Image (spheres, rainbow, N blue to C red):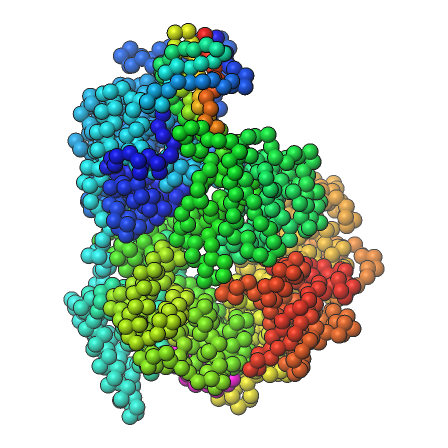
Amino acid sequence: MTRLLRGHPRIDVELDADDQPTAIRWNGRRELVEVCGRWRVEEAWWRDPIARDYVKVVGERWLALVYRDRIRGTWHLERLYD
Amino acid sequence: MPNDDPDARSSGARHIPYAELHCHTNHSFLDGASMAEDLVRRAAELGLTALAATDTDGLYGVVRLTKAAQAAGLHPVLGTEIELGDPAVADPDAVVLPPRRPRRRPRGTPERPPAAEGSPSRPRPGRARLPGYRAVVREDLRGVGARARGPRLVLLARNKTGWSSLTRLLSTGNMTGSKGAPRFDHALLERHHVGVVALSGGRNGEIGRRLLVGDRAGARAAAERLAGILGPDGLVIELTHHLLPDDDWLIAESVALARDLRLPVVVTNAVRYAHPWGRELQDVLTAIRHGRTLDTLADLRRPSGEAYLKSGAELAALGASLEPTVARAWREGIEYSVELAAACTADLDFEQSRFPGFQPPDDLSPDEYLRQLCWKGLHDRYPVDTEDGRKLFTKAEERLERELTTITAKNLEEFFLICWDVMRFAREQRIPAHGRGSAAGSIVTYVLYISRVEPIRHDLLFERFISDHGTVFPDVDIDFSSERREEVIQYIYAKYGPEHTGMVCNLITYRARSAVRDVGNALGFPRPLVDRVAKALETYDPVRVRDDLQADGGFGDLFRASDGSGESGPAPQARVPPPDRASLVGDKGGPGDSPTSIALLQGGSIPGHRSGSSAGIARRSSVAIPHSETGNPLAPPRRVDHAVQPGEGMAPIAVRPMLERTGRASSDEWASDEGTDQRRGGSTIGLSPWERWLELAARLDSFPRHLSIHSGGMLITGRPLVDIVPIERATMPGRVVVQFDKRDVEALKLIKLDLLGLGMLGAIDKTLRLIERDCGEWPDLDTLPEDIPEVFEMIGAADTVGVFQIESRAQMQTLPKSRPTKLDDLVVAVAIIRPGPIQGDAVHPYLRRRQGLEKETYVHEDLRPILEDSLGVILYQEQVMRISMRIAGFSGARSDQFRRAMGAWRVTGDMDEFHHEFVQGAIDHGLEHDQAEDLFRRCAAFANFGFAKSHAAAFARTAYESAFLKLFYPAQTLVGLIDSQPMGFYPTEVLVNDTKHHGVAVLPVDINTSGYRTTTEWVGEEGQPAPIVSSAIVVPSAEARHQWALPGATGWGVRLGLHLVKGIGEQHEEALDRERERGPYRSLVDVVERTDLSEEVVERLIRAGALDSLGRPRRELLWQLREVAGRSGRPARVAGRRRARSAGSADGATPPERATPPGGATAAGSATQRGSAAPTERAAPPGTAASADGAAAPERAAFRQLDLRLPPTEAPPLPTITDAERLGDAYAILGVDPERHAVSLFRPALEQLGAVTNAALADLPIGRVRVGGLVVTRQHPMTARGTVFLALEDETGMVNVTLWPATWARLRPVVRRHALLLVDGELQRDGGVVNLVAHAVQPLPEVAGVRQMGFAGMRRLG
């Protein structure tokens, strides 16, 4: 099962020197993670632009899909794989 | 994650050398969003070592890219990207294309069994794979995305051999495929691979595709096969990282494969645009290509926006997330790109192969043969029977010798022989032709009968044509009569062979209207709105679109973007209801309209639309466009406010600085004072939808859209054409077109021959034929004396409607002032009304000097000999060159470069260096700085819009001849002109009226007298109307006629032909003319039966008055038409007969029913007819029935005669048609009414309103006047800076009306919508030229209180 999170809540992400996430924090929890995939989405520039760098991260408890909103510079959690 | 900002990265990080080897320019036709020049500029900025042009299926962009790259010091790599129609290795599963919509597996069907033993395991065996078949060859690839098409392969030319391989490969592929869908396969690649290196094509290559679906063995086999074809170093595995989810993985797989097979890897970025924001235009292009809107394009768009030019460092950074071994290969790939680029050394110099072969007879060398021909021609052209003749001959001899020496030195003999041969063929076939262009100035072309203007007496120079400086290429343009040019082209094909002959292409590029239309549609604006906006465009100058829209009532307001918050709603928002809304109201919208858009169309505002959407992004930046009615809307200050701070350390992507103004920007400066580019550059995110629309349209402007055949550029090469240039199918069957346009061909240093069709030569040809028919003799124009005073009198009176080159309104305004009296003056007249001299402020000084109102002055004595014959103004290209040599000290080669730069600077903008050099040189020569600047400005403004003198001379000669014909043979001339329409400056109606004013009867269309074509008809002197007496109308005296015209030239009227009736086309010509021969039509039934015309067309004939000679009123004929046409409805009759035959006997039970009442159902009539047909046929009289099985048409006619026994129902008494109706019909159907001018209907009203006739204007004092008339032309010359000129015609003649820009802005809606106008204005007279400066314009019918005008009052222009 995966959970698609409504509203893509903001999270805090700890980055290493290469701007790769090393840990994410959400709801008061902190999870050390490793990156296992990345891609970029730039869409809908003509109406409501989306520009995101997606990172799929895996930690001890979570396999999560997070992204950085490149327009606002914020990190969000989009999906949790159980 | 890589840094977002390429600029920061490229400057900050250490430099990593890189060459981009996979790059599409906009010559990939809607699959590349940057011009070659922009790409080169960006590549140079990024410090790339080389840049390749790899356009789709062709080499369209290489020449431009090469030129730009060489100028920028960048190494160009020449290549292409092709689509292979077959996979290198057959798929073991013979997998088919993935359907465009995923097909559901029916319930219960088992999963596909796993692939056969031995084939590799696949992650998802059930899923259709993507090996890249294109199941069927489709010409229309709309809706077919890249994934569903064949695999791609990038090919680069290593050297000249490689180039030839590419051209041959592309040519063959293009010729075997259909137009726009070439076909390439591996067998073809195998034939043409020498010197070619292939890049595997990334994820769209076969190898990448197989890897992506897990078919490692297949990928390996494909790579082996390709490597087998292309040789050990012919295949390179291409690595591209576009930040897609599986790119890391695909690169790892590709690297492993390459390592396995010991193939090199190279990194490319599959570039399609220069800057990141190019992606937006790229998406729009994709939408246009597939005919969709952006919103419905998800399946066809490229998924990422990463295909911009990246620097080596930027690409290297992408390797950070790869596994160490792969990352190493990635680095090697970047390094290898440099190495590979350096190894690709093909260039585009084909000077050696530019000479086509010409085989002289009798084993002569081309040189000997040319001399032989020239000497023979010299004796013919220069008779020595007089003292003067002998003198001239000596001069000519001397000059010929000099020219021949140069030609021999340049190896151009064969070129001249080819021209001579073409002209010889044309003369033999009696195809009217004249040579012009720079070549026409040489005596060689004169004695070879290529040009017709004697160069010595007219002081034409040879130097511009071929100078010793070596850079000038001979440029011979030959004009032929348009209809017969094809014969000449066929002759050349036959003579030199298709291998060596090709037509230069013409690149069809986007212009304002098409760009706005396509972008609007792609952005999803409602279609009716897009149409409306596109139609509102007044000029085709794309950067002025915005002005136009603002000027055209209403649309400007849509661009008044709101303050504070940007709009980003899907529908365009109109904050201020447009004042012109009335015209929008009532538009019901069309397909693709949403309720919102319809509401907008109807009401101008959108119900329930909240301003400022909830999207945060849109608020981040906003645009404020100051709006003013007439103010300068250009370069709107763009206000950017950062409502949200960008994330730390990250550059916001949406807000980019206004970037680079391109070279185009300045192009407008000469045309208008507002010389700013309206393209902002940067992303369009944050703009209002309207702003985005225009912005993208402005960027799309001048992008190539497709190829078409150039009007006449013919390339004849010594080496087979396919070794030098790629060729492809033209739309015309059997015709081959070269993938390069004429500028490209020039850059390749190939020689082309311009064979152009000239409508006027066709018209002259027809006129001459008619004269031969009517007067029994062929007037030989070649021997026409150059000094007939009557002709010059007519030209000086500006009585030149229909005369070649000097018929425009601008010409008519100047001719009375310049009053040419000899051919040399006419040469000036032809040359002066051109954008070049106009912008160089040459016209008015010349006219004043010509009239003796001022003396000519020269800023420097050295200018006198150069400019003397044009009274001190710069008029010809030669003069510009000579000034640059004499005053600015340019070398000959440099001056030619200067001339060329002037022609091309709109595109390339490299005038700056010349500017400095010129001014400095002139100052050194003794000019003041200001004078030097002024001189340069005059030269530069001249640009390429001026004629060469030899060119103007050739035109002047033809103009003179056409003036002669118009003067002495007006009827035949009118026929020639009407037959060659559309051509020239004026519509048929103006030509007809003008001829009538000269006392020539123009007879209406009549089914019993008119043939298909318009022709002359003998009416005798008494049948001619009296010419209008006016100083603007010149009719030759009897003595002049006697002296210059053939006997029997007068007394001819013009009978308009049936072809003028809309709906009658060439397919009817034969039948109509044959039936007319058979005898007069006696009744409507007769017409319907015999002519084979549809009911609608017969109706038009009636309404045009063509059936008046049947002796019945038009309304009665119309009343009966339905019945008559219904009765003889062909399909019904044929069906009836067939049935009767198959039945063996006629079912004659149903008696032929009498007329179905008009207006009754046609179907009923047909049904009845079906029954009655058989007995009728059986009852046919023997004489006609005998032919029943013969040729179709006579049989039909014979059969139908019978219906005559059943006269159509009597019509009730019907009112006769009014004059207004008759006139309206004539205008609507024929476009002309020979009997009455539309304005004459208003004459009583006009008189009441105090308006005068146009003819009367000539004698009125200057001051306020009022006239009424029909707009026949409306012009917005680029050179007039917004002033608009109307030609207003009434029943007595034409008058020129000037609308100053402010007036135009005010009156624009009226003038644009109405053809019949009442104009109040200021009458001006200047040197015999009458001009009306308008103050107020009103629609005439409204003012005159006439509501019903049929079609005549409708807007017909623009």
Residue B791 in the magenta stretch? The answer is yes
Residue occupying the point 59% across, 44% down: B561
Q: Please identify the quarter of the rendering in which residue B1340 is found.
A: bottom right
Q: Is residue B494 visible?
A: no
Depth check: give the residue in front, B759 or B824: B824
Lateral position of residue B260 relative to residue B386, left or right: left
Residue occupying the point 60% across, 69% down: B1298
Compared to residue B535, the image places residue B845 above or below, namely: below
Residue B29 in the magenta stretch? The answer is no
Compared to residue B398, the image places residue B505 above or below, namely: above
Q: Position of residue B887 (x, y in %)?
A: 30, 74
Q: Position of residue B966 (x, y in %)?
A: 52, 77
Q: Which residues are magenta?
A: B779-793
Q: Position of residue B316 (x, y in %)?
A: 28, 30
Compared to residue B592, the image places residue B1255 above or below, namely: below
Quadrant position of the C terminus of chain B in the picture: bottom right
Q: Position of residue B886 (x, y in %)?
A: 28, 74
Q: How many marks?
A: 0
Quadrant position of the N terminus of chain B in the picture: top left
Compared to residue B373, the image places residue B787 above or below, namely: below
Depth check: give the residue in front, B1144 or B1229: B1229
Residue occupying the point 36% across, 63% down: B902
Depth check: give the residue in front, B805 or B852: B852
